[in-house]
C-alpha cells in the first residue's frame, strides 16, 4: 500500500479506502469507478506467465503488453513484460521439455488518476519470426538524434522494424516527422505499442498440460478509491 499523510487522514474519515483488484484467465477487465468519485492507481502486481502447451510455443509467448486506459479516453498507460523462463521436463521423464516462468511476482509502483471506469487490456506480443530490419524511412534533418557525443550527429537514423503486416516500429523514442510523412496513420509508430487483435488475446490453458497453472495472467491493481471528486480532494 502506497499512501501519504493526507490520504491517511481521509481514510480515517471514511472518504477513501484501499482496494486491490485482481484479474486473470482473460484479456480484458474493468475496474469500476464510484459515481462522483475517482480512483488513484498506485501499484501493479504482475505474475509472470506464458502461453501454449509445447516448449516452442511457450518460448514464443513469454512477452506481453498491459494497457490501462480511462473509459472514453485515448490516453494509455502501457507496460511491457518479457517474462524469463526456466526449462523443465515432464514428471514421468519421457515428455518433451517445457518452459515455465522463472521469476516471482513483480511489484510496480505507478501513479494515475481515473474519474471513470478503468479499462484493462492484456495481449501476447507477436512473435518476431516474420519480422525484419530495414531502412524504409529515414528521419528528416529536424528529427536527427542529438549531436556527438550524445547521439548520431548528422547521420539519419535508419533502423526500422517490421513486426507484422502494416506495423512498423522506429527506434527513435520521440514523436517526430519522417521523410515525406508526418507522425500519423496506420503503420507509423514511434513507440513500442502493439495493436489489439484477436490472434493476440490470452488463450485458454491446456487442460491436460502439466504447465497449465503458468499459462494465464494473474494481475493485481492496488488503488485508492475516493468517494469525493478530485476538486473536493484538492480543497481538503
Image: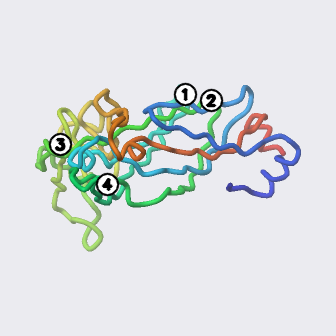
Percent across and percent down for residue 175 are: 34, 46
Q: Which of 22 and 227 is in front in this view?
A: 22
Residue 36 — which label? none
**Image-quadrant location for residue 21:** top right
Sequence-wise first label, 3 or 1 = 1
Q: Is residue 24 above or below residue 96?
A: above
Q: Provide the residue designation for mark 3.
A: 162
Residue 71 — which label? 1
**Callout 2: few (<14), some (14-19), or many (20+) C-alpha neighbours within 10 Å?**
many
Real-space CA distance between mark 2 and mark 1, rounded to the nearest whole angstrom:
6 Å
Q: Is mark 4 on a helix, strand or loop?
A: loop
Real-space CA distance between mark 4 and mark 2, rounded to the nearest whole angstrom:
48 Å
Residue at screen point 18% across, 48% down: 160
Percent across and percent down for residue 134 are: 11, 49
Q: What element carries label 1?
A: loop
Residue 116 — which label? 2
Amino acid at each position: 500500500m502506497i499512501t501519504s499523510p493526507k490520504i491517511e487522514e481521509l481514510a480515517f474519515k471514511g472518504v477513501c479506502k484501499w482496494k486491490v483488484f485482481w484479474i486473470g484467465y482473460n484479456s480484458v477487465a474493468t475496474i469500476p469507478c464510484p459515481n462522483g468519485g475517482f480512483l488513484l492507481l498506485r501499484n501493479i502486481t504482475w505474475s509472470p506467465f506464458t502461453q501454449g502447451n509445447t516448449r516452442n510455443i511457450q518460448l514464443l509467448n513469454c512477452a506481453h503488453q498491459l494497457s490501462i486506459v480511462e473509459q472514453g479516453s485515448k490516453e494509455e498507460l502501457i507496460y511491457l513484460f518479457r517474462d524469463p523462463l526456466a526449462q523443465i521436463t515432464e514428471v514421468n521423464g519421457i515428455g518433451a521439455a517445457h518452459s515455465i516462468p522463472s521469476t516471482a511476482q513483480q511489484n510496480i509502483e505507478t501513479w494515475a488518476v481515473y474519474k471513470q471506469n478503468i479499462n484493462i487490456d492484456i495481449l501476447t506480443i507477436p512473435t518476431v519470426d516474420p519480422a525484419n530490419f530495414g531502412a524504409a524511412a529515414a528521419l528528416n534533418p529536424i528529427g536527427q538524434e542529438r549531436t556527438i557525443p550524445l547521439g548520431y550527429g548528422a547521420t539519419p537514423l535508419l533502423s526500422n522494424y517490421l513486426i507484422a503486416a502494416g506495423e512498423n516500429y522506429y527506434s527513435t523514442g520521440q514523436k517526430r516527422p519522417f521523410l515525406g510523412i508526418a507522425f500519423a496513420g496506420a503503420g507509423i509508430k514511434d513507440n513500442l505499442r502493439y495493436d489489439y487483435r484477436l490472434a493476440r488475446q490470452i488463450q485458454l490453458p491446456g487442460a491436460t498440460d502439466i504447465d497449465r497453472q503458468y499459462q494465464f495472467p494473474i494481475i493485481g491493481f492496488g488503488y485508492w478509491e475516493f468517494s469525493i471528486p478530485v476538486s473536493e480532494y484538492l480543497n481538503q
